[in-house]
Image (tube, rainbow, N blue to C red):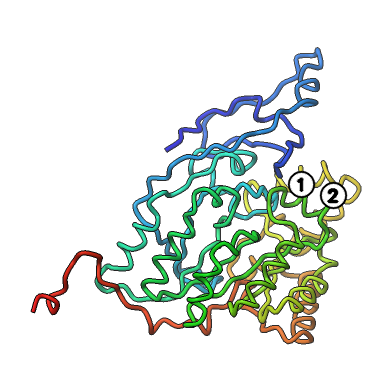
Amino acid sequence: MPDGSIHDASTLLNGVRKGRGATTNPAVRFDRHSTAAFDDGWDTLGEDAAELPALATTLIKDSSRSALAWNKSPDIGFDRSINPYRGCEHGCIYCFARPTHAYLGFSPGLDFETKLLFKPQIAELLEKELRKPGYSPAPIAIGTNTDPYQPVERTLKLMRGILEVLERFNHPVTIVTKSAGVLRDMDILARMAQRGLARVCLSVTTLDPALARILEPRAATPARRLDALTKLAAAGIPTAVLAAPMIPAVNDMELERILERAAACGVDRAGFVLLRLPLEIADLFEAWLREHMPDRAERVMSLVRQTREGAAYNSRFGQRQTGTGPYAEMLRHRFHVAARRLGLERTQQGHTSQSGLRCDLFSVPHMPGVATQLQLF
């Protein structure tokens, strides 16, 4: 595993990096020591920051011995998930998964976008777990932490292997992504959908490509996501849209338009999530605001705190996804009215609903080359 003990000062320089979302790379909260950029009086810091180099993506093998992650959270509608990647190259500044990178010894800032862990044996690990005696099937959620179809998936193809295993076992799955890359696996998903085993949700944050470029620098454009929804629905794959996150005074005015465009693409369900700023994300997001939207930064953060009882974030179960207070209640009302008008089934707590997926078809296939006892007679 990476040590991440002390970060080089050059990575702590503030500024916009081409193709990256975070403007800072804060120290890991578990480290005893950290470094900070310091101007020696000769304005060298300003000169360095003026020409920040592009940051390359580093891939690191993850040695995890399991494919499934389990949870008992009352806030979410699934108890198991798969995360083929840790860290995400999409670079979404608001991503609630950023703080998890600190557990790996990396910064939730630029490290989260540039130092990615991947699980090369995840398909094999998944098959072993599904073959365990006593395994009881329930829908597996993929894309609940980091995006399974982020750019590196084009070459690593981990999701393709995962879906091949799930199809052979007739195991139900839900996928959340903001990438049109999911279309690559539409053949498998269509076959699974015919048996009631698959649902795909596309996250659409904004319809404005200019805003998307700074919010989610390496994610698919809004138009490509809507096109993906259209093609998935046309292939008979149940689809949903997640308007997330809704950011006060940044994209909240687009909520109804996002749902309307998605409904026209053929989705049958919708959800939304209010902006969440746990741990380091609050400072990262505020730094991003002051860089890209200095004229409204104070207003945005004021509205955020109004939805979190005066703080940047409230982690209480039942409130994390939707917030509290007049603004949060107004957003919930707007969503419910629009969803009802458009005939979209609302999803629980902003997540894709897993009702309707079949678990009764699950079966453990024979291992290739291994004869069963009956076949010996």
Depth order, front residue of 172/1 = 172
Depth order, front residue of 96/233 = 233
| Disc number placed over residue 286 in the picture, else none | 1
Seen in the image, is 288 located left or right of residue 61?
right
Location of the C terminus (image quadrant)? bottom left
Q: Position of residue 14 (x, y in %)?
A: 74, 33
Position of 191 relative to 206 (above/below): below
User: Residue at horizontal 83%, vertical 45%?
Assistant: 292
Amino acid type at image mark 1: Glu
Q: Position of residue 180 (x, y in %)?
A: 65, 61
Q: Position of residue 270 (x, y in %)?
A: 68, 76
Seen in the image, is 280 located left or right of residue 261?
left
Residue under label 2: 297
Q: Are marks 1 and 2 in contact (CB under 8 Å)?
A: yes
| Disc number placed over residue 344 in the picture, else none | none
* Mark 2 residue element: helix
